[in-house]
Amino acid sequence: MKKKLISALLCVAMVSSMLVGCGSGAAETPAAEAPAAEGEAEAEAPAAEEPAAEAPAASADGGKVYYLNFKPEVDTQWQEIAAAYTAETGVEVKVVTAASDTYEEVLRSEIAGTDAPTLFQINGPVGYQNWKDYCLDLTNSELYNALSDKGLAVTGADGGVYGVPYTVEAYGIIYNDAIMQAYFATDGAKAASVDEINSFAKLKEVVEDMTAKKDDLGIQGVFASTSLLPGEDWRWQTHLANVPVYYEYKDNNVSDMAEITFKYSDNFKNIWDLYINNSTCAPGLLGSKAVTDSMAEFALGQCAMVQNGNWAWGQISDVEGNTVKEEDVKFMPIYTGIAGEENQGLCTGTENFWCVNSQASEADQKATLDFVNWMISSDAGKDYMVNSLGNAAPFSTFGDDEKPVDPLAKEMFRYMENGKNSVTWNFTTFPSQAFKDDFGAALLEYCNGNMTWDEVKDLVVSRWAEEKSATAE
């Protein structure tokens, strides 16, 4: 997978974009794992009833395009893209953007209508299971054939290709290199450079020494506040949880499991305790903290590190009074103490998959495929993909001169090109949003001293099995 991801990402273009990992995806994007980066701040979008707007005009062969967009923050850009494509080709494209956290609801309402979306998106294998009856097999499409790493696509049990990713992202521990350099210059520093930090043991040693010297370093804590406000915990119950699940899947040579043992629970606890005990605020106060709080703390130089993704550059640079210089914003992997982690890279993947409606007419399907092919192959389309939408598009049609320009995107590519093993995004297989919400609530109870870690582990194992079973029924 490492070689595949490296190959894919060497050919991509990108600038950073904002989420709720979770998305997801989720995203993160927390709801049904929003594509892009779970939990990123999103602006309000057009109301759900907008899909009833006037249908787009048909092309000469009767085809039309209707794209149901997930991300409110890029609605304006998509409207511009639609207008540009119509001006160039004569085929009108309707783009409707679902309001924040309503995508599944709007898609469910629209997909069965007479003017249903011809292009929509899913968050991965779980999303495919929900919408497989409406996903066209893209195996022979130009879109799929241009995908640099075919392993990134969503496939069905029949081997068909039903979702093609249109962007790739990465997350890890973001650090302020100016603060780190100041620490390395202190007496008795536990490392001389960030390059020496390639394991949890070394990270813990450095972080705890930095905490002891935080007054000298001019910081309030090493890590930004570990946001656990309900709905803001996607960085932990989805993104951080991805690391132990990734290794458990890897041990079992699978890409999903109906039940997990949470084998690497203690490793999750390792990094979790390090975060909450070396933070800008006490563990008992984390339930009132949002992602914007933690990103502001980092931007204002109040801490040295924060877990987030490459989409967070905007959340850093846009903070009023920002003191962090662009050249000082760097990434390191999330180390948890698992054997072999010295070769671990960032968590890299996607929750953003385009699907073409298999229930649409052949003319509409063709018009839609022509549209997405224009997005990834024409100069105008690629410019929109990179500079307007901020996508790291994993297609061979993007050249070396179409590289990322923001610091975290550059760091993402640096890790992809330095031979490290990327941690793939497996949180798209997490059983449900209810599971993630319960996991996040348990983490808060642990921080408040109301649950033991064994109780947290038991909850994760039992709720995973329950929700997977319910989904399978």
Image (cartoon, rainbow, N blue to C red):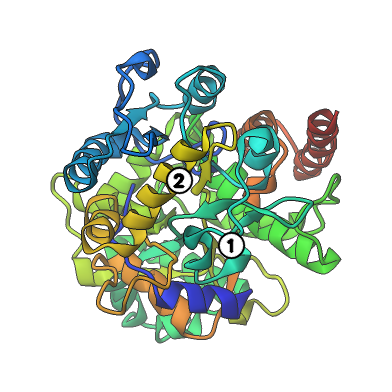
The residue that appears at 38% across and 66% down in the rendered structure is 213
User: In which quadrant of the rendered view does residue 217 lie?
Assistant: bottom left
Q: Select label 1 or label 2 by which is in front.
A: 2
Inspect this view and state whether residue 218 appears. yes
The residue that appears at 30% across and 78% down in the rendered structure is 181
| Residue 189 place in picture, x, y as percent | 42, 81
Residue 257 higher or lower than 405, as above or below: above
In what element is the residue under mark 2? helix
Q: Mark 2 — residue?
A: 366
Q: Nearer the viewer, residue 422 or 263?
A: 422
Residue 65 higher or lower than 154, as above or below: above
The residue that appears at 60% across and 71% down in the rendered structure is 200
Q: CA distance from mark 1 to mark 2?
A: 23 Å
Residues at circles 1 and 2 in contact by the CB criterion of under 8 Å: no
Tell me if 164 is positioned left or right of 223 in this view: right
- Amino acid, disc 2: Lys
The residue that appears at 62% across and 34% down in the rendered structure is 134
Q: Quadrant of the N terminus?
A: bottom right
Q: Nearer the viewer, residue 315 or 125?
A: 125
Q: Which mark identifies residue 202?
A: none
Q: Nearer the viewer, residue 472 or 230?
A: 472
Q: Nearer the viewer, residue 274 or 360?
A: 360
In what element is the residue under mark 1? helix
User: In which quadrant of the rendered view does residue 45 lie?
Assistant: top left
Q: Residues within 10 Å of mark 2 (few under 14, many from 20)?
A: some
Q: Residues within 10 Å of mark 1 (few under 14, many from 20)?
A: many
First reached walking from the N terminus: tag 1 or tag 2? 1
Q: Mark 1 — residue?
A: 152
